[in-house]
């Protein structure tokens, strides 16, 4: 019995010696020594083992931190491979998302052309939205104020088919005439002239002279204004589907006595109807100020209009 046990121990020692002599994985296979009783491992199995070892080496480390109860809390990495506790996004991205969601409502307004300050509160967007079509009716005094506001702020405007527009009145309201184009007689097709001007003007005022524009033409010009970001104001005719409609009516004058005096202010009753807004109404007054005339908030003519110092000579029509 003793000799058999000693023989087995000798065989095990010899086996360990031979296994220790086997080269590491990746060394030349010719340098390996044969081991009695062992079969060679297939190449496919070795490649699988290699890939498994590589995958295990790429696994992210698991971080454990103790808690008060004595049990470890494991922070597992996210599926995107971000560090623990990042929830898949960086702090900068989180801050940026928070700022966007807290943006003020004023930033959501569409870009609009400037208008006289007294008119801003009556318009849904605080001005004439760029790329829109506006229908205007009534006294041309406020229309002159729109032209003055746009050109006076550095924009370009054009007037088509309004030969009786008072340029002196427009200039007294602060307009820059070098930024204003006048086409008093556009010929037989004023719509085509207005379409060309929409390519380069911020504001185009089109006088229809009582004409009714077909739906097919209104759609073409509406799409042109939207694509160019220009505002088209149509007056003196019929136009289907405007985004905004502004109607004005002379409500009264002040400064005139019985057979004497000077015209000092004119008051307009203004009503605004928007496609997606409640109708708004108000009163504006045209008053002189520092050598020019400007629009201010007025009151109903039945209750009187405050009489300012100065004389309005040309801006009433």
Image: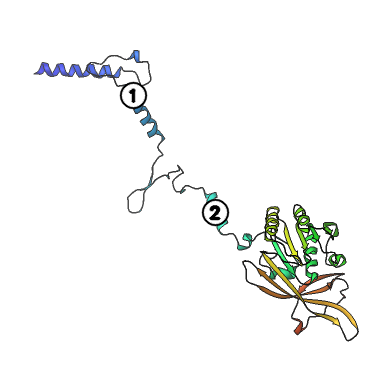
Residue corresponding to mark 2: 97
**Residue 272 drawn at (x, y percent):** 69, 71
**Quarter of the image with the C terminus in it:** bottom right
- Is 10 drawn above or below residue 278 in the view shown? above
In this view, which residue lies farthest toward the bottom? 258
State the image quarter where residue 177 is shown. Answer: bottom right
Residue corresponding to mark 1: 44
**Residue 98 drawn at (x, y percent):** 54, 56
Q: Which one is nearer the viewer's eye here, 172 or 139?
A: 139
State the image quarter where residue 264 is shown. Answer: bottom right
Label 2 element class: helix
**Residue 222 drawn at (x, y percent):** 68, 58
Q: Which mark is residue 60?
A: none
Label 1 element class: helix
Q: Which one is nearer the viewer's eye here, 65 or 219?
A: 219
Q: Is residue 281 left or right of residue 264?
A: left
């Amino acid at each position: 019995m003793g000799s058999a046990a000693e023989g087995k121990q000798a065989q095990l020692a010899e086996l360990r010696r031979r296994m220790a002599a086997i080269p590491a994985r990746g060394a030349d296979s010719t340098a390996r020594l044969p081991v009695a009783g062992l079969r060679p491992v297939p190449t496919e199995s070795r490649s699988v083992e290699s890939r498994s070892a590589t995958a295990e080496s790429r696994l992210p480390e698991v971080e454990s931190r103790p808690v008060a109860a004595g049990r470890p809390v494991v922070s597992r990495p996210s599926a995107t491979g971000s560090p623990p506790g990042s929830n898949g996004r960086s702090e900068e991205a989180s801050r940026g998302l928070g700022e966007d969601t807290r943006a003020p409502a004023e930033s959501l307004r569409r870009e609009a052309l400037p208008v006289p300050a007294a008119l801003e509160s009556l318009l849904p967007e605080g001005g004439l939205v760029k790329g829109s079509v506006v229908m205007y009716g009534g006294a041309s005094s406020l229309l002159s104020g729109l032209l003055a506001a746009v050109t006076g702020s550095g924009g370009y405007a054009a007037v088509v088919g309004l030969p009786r527009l008072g340029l002196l009145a427009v200039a007294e309201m602060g307009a820059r005439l070098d930024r204003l184009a006048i086409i008093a007689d556009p010929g037989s097709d004023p719509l085509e002239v207005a379409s060309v001007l929409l390519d380069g003007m911020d504001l185009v005022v089109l006088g229809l002279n009582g004409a009714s524009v077909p739906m097919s033409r209104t759609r073409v010009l509406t799409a042109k204004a939207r694509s160019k970001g220009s505002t088209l104001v149509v007056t003196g005719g019929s136009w289907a589907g405007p985004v905004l409609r502004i109607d004005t009516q002379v409500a009264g004058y002040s400064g005139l006595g019985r057979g004497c005096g000077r015209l000092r202010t004119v008051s307009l009753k203004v009503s605004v109807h928007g496609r997606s807004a409640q109708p708004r109404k108000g009163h504006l007054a045209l008053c002189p100020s520092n050598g020019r005339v400007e629009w201010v908030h007025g009151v109903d003519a039945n209750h009187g209009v405050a009489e300012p110092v100065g004389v309005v000579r040309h801006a009433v029509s």
